[in-house]
């Protein structure tokens, strides 16, 4: 009877050692979320122009000659320190820097305040200001230095430049090659500069409710930090040599455990046969 109990205990220990930690999987329980949360997930995304944004502004009309004063000659723009999402580099663009007061200097029109406006609102404001001279004018404003950063326990920590001005926290994780197995999935930290005020928000990637978060879509210059889990923190207290020694010892003990379990199972089987 005692041998059977020992054999059962060894089997249970083996199964427990093979169990996948629950907090590794993302979006747990997403199939069971309520209708109320599903409604909150359907949120609108609206990029707003901020200080230090670098803009391209294209003014067009049926008669291209009338828009020439509003479209300065192009020049190349590219930042080597930033990784482009689009494989094509940003080239041949005349850019406008939004100053600390939220203004740009635009040809013919002079200083125009654009900070705080959405892309659509900026298009409308410029079109209204140019329409007297160009009745059928169309304006296209884009942010070309929209960038977000991620560091910590991810495969590819980096600052990423976003070409379409829209990115979610999940998109950023995919671009960064996902969290490592040592990343703390239930406690990601978002750092945001909101008009000079620092905002810090925590994300739980195991909870599907993140889709309903007002911070699900990132803004330009957002930084995301992925904290290491407890196992990684404990390992950090040991030197490389100590970690290597612990790995060897752990491997030996695991081998002994497997051999012991096998021997006990064989002995128990032989005794039952006899």
Image (spheres, rainbow, N blue to C red):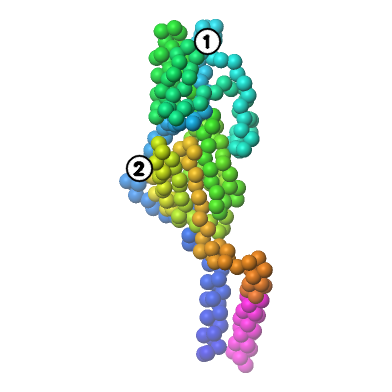
Q: Which residue is mark 1?
A: 69
Q: Which residue is mark 2?
A: 40
> Which secondary structure lies at badge 1?
helix
Residue 162 is situated, as x and y percent measured from the top left of the image, at 54, 35
Residue 16 in sight: yes
Residue 205 in sight: no
Mark carried by residue 13: none
- Can residue 138 be found in the magenta stretch? no
Residue 117 is situated, as x and y percent measured from the top left of the image, at 40, 27
In the image, what residue occupies the spot 55% across and 49% down? 151
Q: How many other residues sit within 10 Å of disc 2, few (<14), some (14-19) or many (≥20)?
A: few
Q: Nearer the viewer, residue 195 or 270?
A: 195
Vertical side of 184 occupied by 201: above or below? above
Span of residues in magenta? 251-274
Q: How many other residues sit within 10 Å of disc 1, few (<14), some (14-19) or many (≥20)?
A: few
In the image, what residue occupies the spot 52% across and 10% down? 69
**Dot 2 or dot 1, earlier in sequence:** 2
Residue 189 is situated, as x and y percent measured from the top left of the image, at 46, 50
Closer mark to the observer between disc 2 and disc 1: 1
């Amino acid at each position: 009877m005692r041998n059977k109990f020992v054999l059962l205990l060894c089997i249970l220990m083996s199964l427990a050692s093979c169990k996948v930690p629950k907090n590794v999987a993302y979006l747990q329980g997403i199939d069971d979320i309520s209708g109320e949360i599903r409604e909150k997930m359907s949120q609108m995304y609206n990029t707003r122009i901020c200080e230090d944004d670098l803009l391209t502004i294209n003014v067009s009309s049926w008669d291209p000659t009338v828009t020439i004063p509003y479209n300065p000659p192009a020049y190349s723009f590219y930042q080597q320190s930033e990784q482009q999402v689009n494989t094509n580099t940003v080239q041949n663009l005349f850019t406008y820097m939004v100053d600390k007061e939220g203004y740009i200097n635009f040809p013919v029109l002079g200083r125009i305040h654009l900070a705080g406006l959405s892309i659509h609102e900026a298009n409308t404001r410029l079109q209204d200001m140019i329409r007297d001279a160009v009745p059928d004018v169309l304006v296209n404003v884009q942010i070309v230095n929209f960038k977000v950063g991620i560091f910590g326990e991810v495969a590819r920590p980096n600052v990423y430049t976003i070409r379409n001005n829209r990115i979610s926290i999940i998109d950023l994780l995919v671009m960064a090659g996902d969290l490592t197995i040592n990343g703390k999935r239930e406690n990601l930290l978002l750092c945001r500069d909101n008009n000079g005020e620092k905002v810090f928000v925590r994300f739980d990637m195991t909870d599907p409710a993140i889709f309903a978060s007002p911070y699900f879509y990132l803004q330009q210059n957002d930084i995301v930090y992925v904290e290491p889990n407890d196992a990684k923190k404990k390992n950090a207290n040991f030197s490389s040599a100590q970690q290597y020694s612990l790995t060897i010892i752990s491997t030996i003990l695991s081998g002994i455990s497997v051999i012991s379990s096998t021997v006990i199972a064989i002995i128990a089987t032989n005794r039952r046969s006899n």
